[in-house]
Image (spheres, rainbow, N blue to C red):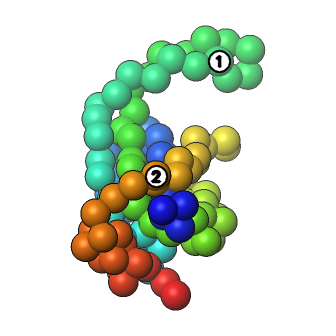
Amino acid sequence: MTEFCTVYVTVGSEAQALEIARTVVNENLAACANLLGPVTSVYRWQGKTHEDAEVALLLKTRRVLFDALAERIRTLHSYDCPCIVAWPLEAGTADYLGWVRDQTRR
């Protein structure tokens, strides 16, 4: 099942999350995007602790597309250092994973 992964991204607003989601789905870099939020993120940046509201994106795709997907997200993202990480899918139903495969670039 390591052909597939979920990509986790955090953004500063719902509008930006929707822009990224629509773009990567329309460009077949991801089959689906789920927007979760708002979430509260606590992190250190440039020597200071921050606490901000963000929106999280879960993108379903194939691992082979991660680099292209991450690069496309970077072009749309407002952060200097956006969170873009992937987790492998260890299991999934054959029909769903077939759909993810069919909806993403070959």
Instruction: Point out residue 45 in the picture as x, y percentages from the top left corner.
Output: 67, 23
Instruction: Point out residue 46 in the picture as x, y percentages from the top left corner.
Output: 73, 22
Residue type at numbered disc 1: Arg
- Residue drawn 46% across and 23% down? 41
Placement of 76 over or under 104, stated as above or below: above
Residue 13 in the figure: left or right of residue 6: left
Q: Between 57 and 91, which is closer to the camera in this rendering? A: 91
Q: Between 4 and 104, which is closer to the camera in this rendering? A: 4
The label number, if any, that marks residue 44 in the structure image: 1
Observer-side mark, 1 or 2, equals: 2
Q: Residues within 10 Å of mark 1 (few under 14, many from 20)?
A: few
Q: Is residue 72 visible?
A: no
- Furthest toward the right, the residue is 47
The label number, if any, that marks residue 90 in the structure image: 2
Image quarter of residue 94: bottom left
- Residue drawn 34% across and 28% down? 39
Residue 41 in the figure: left or right of residue 99: right
Q: Between 7 and 55, which is closer to the camera in this rendering? A: 7
Q: Between 97 and 26, which is closer to the camera in this rendering? A: 97
| Comes first in the chain, label 1 or label 2 | 1
Q: Secondary structure at mark 2?
A: loop
- Residue drawn 58% across and 46% down? 85
Instruction: Point out residue 17 in the picture as x, y percentages from the top left corner.
Output: 37, 51
Placement of 67 over or under 42, stated as above or below: below
Image quarter of residue 83: top right
Residue type at numbered disc 2: Glu
The label number, if any, that marks residue 93 in the structure image: none
